[in-house]
Image: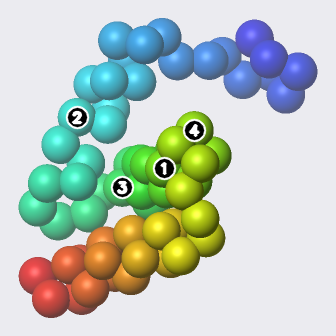
Amino acid sequence: EDEDGDVPMRNEEMASKFHGCLDGKPNQFTPEAIAMYISWKCYKEGRKLSTGESVHAAFKYHYMHM
């Protein structure tokens, strides 16, 4: 358990929850997956704010035009 009393997910469990969350209609895990992707691009890869904004705009456009 973490300090909030939540039990962290195992890698396999997390992978099964996020599998396909960016395919087709959004589900409850889609926003978190997009946020994690933007964070990875900007912080881990050292991209600038404009990259994060562009990724956000692209996903927004994609889901608005489904």
Compute the Cα span from label 1 to label 4: 6 Å
Q: Do the residues labelled 3 and 1 touch (CB within 8 Å)?
A: no
In the drawing, what numbered circle is on residue 44?
4
Q: Residue at x 48, y 11 (%)?
A: 10
Query: Label 2 neighbourhood size at 10 Å, few (<14), some (14-19), many (20+)?
Result: few
- Per the image, the residue denoted by label 3 is 30
- Per the image, the residue denoted by label 2 is 19
Q: Is residue 51 above or below residue 45?
A: below
The amino acid type found where label 2 is placed reads His
Asked where in the image residue 44 lies, by quadrant, the reply is top right
In the drawing, what numbered circle is on residue 8?
none
Compute the Cα span from label 4 to label 3: 20 Å
Q: Do the residues labelled 4 and 3 touch (CB within 8 Å)?
A: no
- Answer with mark 2 or mark 3, whichever residue precedes in sequence: 2
Mark 1: secondary structure: helix
Q: Are marks 1 and 4 in contact (CB under 8 Å)?
A: yes
- Answer with mark 3 or mark 1, whichever residue precedes in sequence: 3
- Per the image, the residue denoted by label 1 is 41
Comparing labels 4 and 2, the label whose residue is closer to the camera: 4
Instruction: Using the image as rendered, state which of residue 53 and residue 11 is in the foreground.
Output: 53
Residue 55 is at least partly visible in this image? yes
Q: Are marks 2 and 3 in contact (CB under 8 Å)?
A: no
Compute the Cα span from label 1 to label 2: 19 Å
In this picture, residue 40 sits left or right of residue 12: right
- Answer with mark 4 or mark 2, whichever residue precedes in sequence: 2
- Answer with mark 1 or mark 2, whichever residue precedes in sequence: 2
Q: Do the residues labelled 1 and 2 touch (CB within 8 Å)?
A: no
Q: In this view, does 2 lie above or below 21?
A: above
In this picture, residue 61 sits left or right of residue 4: left
Comparing labels 4 and 3, the label whose residue is closer to the camera: 4
Compute the Cα span from label 3 to label 1: 17 Å
